[in-house]
Amino acid sequence: MSKLKQTQDYEKTASFKFFRWISGEKDPYIGTIEMQEQSEHQVEDDTITERMWEKQMIIDEIYDVDHNRILTKFHKLYKIAAVLFCVALTFFLLLTVSYLPRTGNAANPDNNEVAQRYIESGLQETGAVNIVSGMILTYRAFDTFGETNALFIATVCVMILLMVDEKTLEERSEARLNSGRIKDDIILQMTAKFLVPFILIFGIYVILNGQNSPGGGFSGGAILGAGLILYANAFGIKPTQRFFNEKVYRIAKVSALCMYGCIGLYYYTMGANHLADHIPNGIPGHILSGGIILPIDICVGLEVACTMYAFYALFKRGGL
Amino acid sequence: MTIFQMILLVFIIVCAIAVSFSRNLLNSVLIFMSYSLIMSIIWICLESPDLAITEAAVGAGVTTILFITTLKKIHAMGAEDKKTKTNALEVEREAEEHE
């Protein structure tokens, strides 16, 4: 146990004198021993000019932002060059725009036989009433596959950057509980209780009806993800983890992506070899129609919903 | 182009400019959200309901939530209100330490 000393007592101790001598406040030899008279230190003029020259050289040669003349000049030039570059870029882009063909002209390159073919025989070949779904999920299925992969890679990157291990997560949530930040907002909870089922059912409807009505995998998946986020926001992460935890997320995400790849591969292999595929197109307008559109829609919807919710959970607390 | 669509387009330009000129980050996010909502109405007017649904769900819903979560993480929300409070607390704490 330490004891506080009075200042006067402390000044008498040896340690105080020693530290005073170390810090140079008092020289104990002055006045006690005989000393030779010392002359004032003189600096010669030559060394002064030499030093000034050296300092100027350092300023000019070495990276000194405040005093370097060349660097200051470069910064001014840099600003002017940046403005000139922007103006030039704008000019060239506008010049390119002026060379583009007019919108709606019949001779435009985008009015070719491909679009006509999609519109005329899309319903017959894909069985989809919604022509957009028919296009992006059958004729252009591999483009959409690339987009789905991009989503997958985006979540993986966010996971790599933001994911923390379980132990830290628990510590954090405990700290947050102790600090009293989590509040059960009754208005939010009642609204969520009322709205979330409808949002989820609407999302599922949009996904399943992708071939007949506007929507499809991406829109429906986004709606599902938004509903999940609302639920997690209102009731906290624990109740959400009962039905959507990391395991479910992994299985859903990877299996959806693989299934999409397999279906697309099957469809393209059969089509390229002029073989009849074994997925019936069904009657247009029914839920079970459109050949491969319905399963692919479900896969894309799962993928997008998982991505949306995973982004939210990872940003919010660093884990699913 | 009807007058309704013209009003929407003018509103969208105003929103786009206001986002970059707003000093408060939360205001910027909310203006961006209204931008997305108007954009989804414009998509409906242009007869592409697919895009309208996606825009409403992603642009107005999920993106806004992500932005607000990020703002909360970096403690940028309500920074002006909290500043005075924390300053007062710090002054008090320092006074206690000096004693």
Image (spheres, coloured by chain):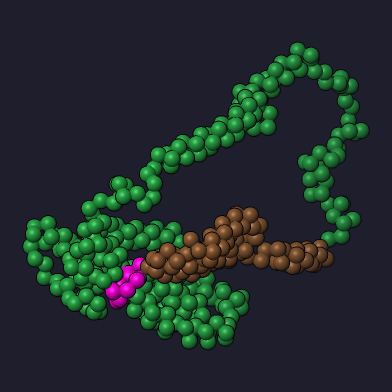
Residue A220 figure quarter: bottom left
In the rendered image, which quarter contains the C terminus of chain A? Answer: bottom left
Give the chain coloured brown: B
Instruction: Count the labels in the image.
Output: 0
Percent position (x, y) of residue B37? 51, 67
Relative side of A120 to A46, left or right:
left
Residue closest to the eye, A2 or A157:
A157
Q: Give the overall secondary structure of the magenta segment.
A: loop
Which residue is farthest right?
Answer: A31
Identity of the residue drawn at 65% across and 20% down? A57
Relative side of A63 to A13, left or right:
left
Residue closest to the eye, A118 or A145:
A118
On the question of residue A296 being in view, the answer is yes
Give the chain coloured green: A
Q: Is residue A231 magenta?
A: no
In the rendered image, which quarter contains the N terminus of chain A? Answer: bottom right
Identity of the residue drawn at 29% across and 69% down? A130
On screen, A302 above or below A161? below
Identity of the residue drawn at 39% across and 75% down? A224
Q: Which residues are magenta?
A: A208-218
Percent position (x, y) of residue A64? 64, 30
Percent position (x, y) of residue A127? 20, 70
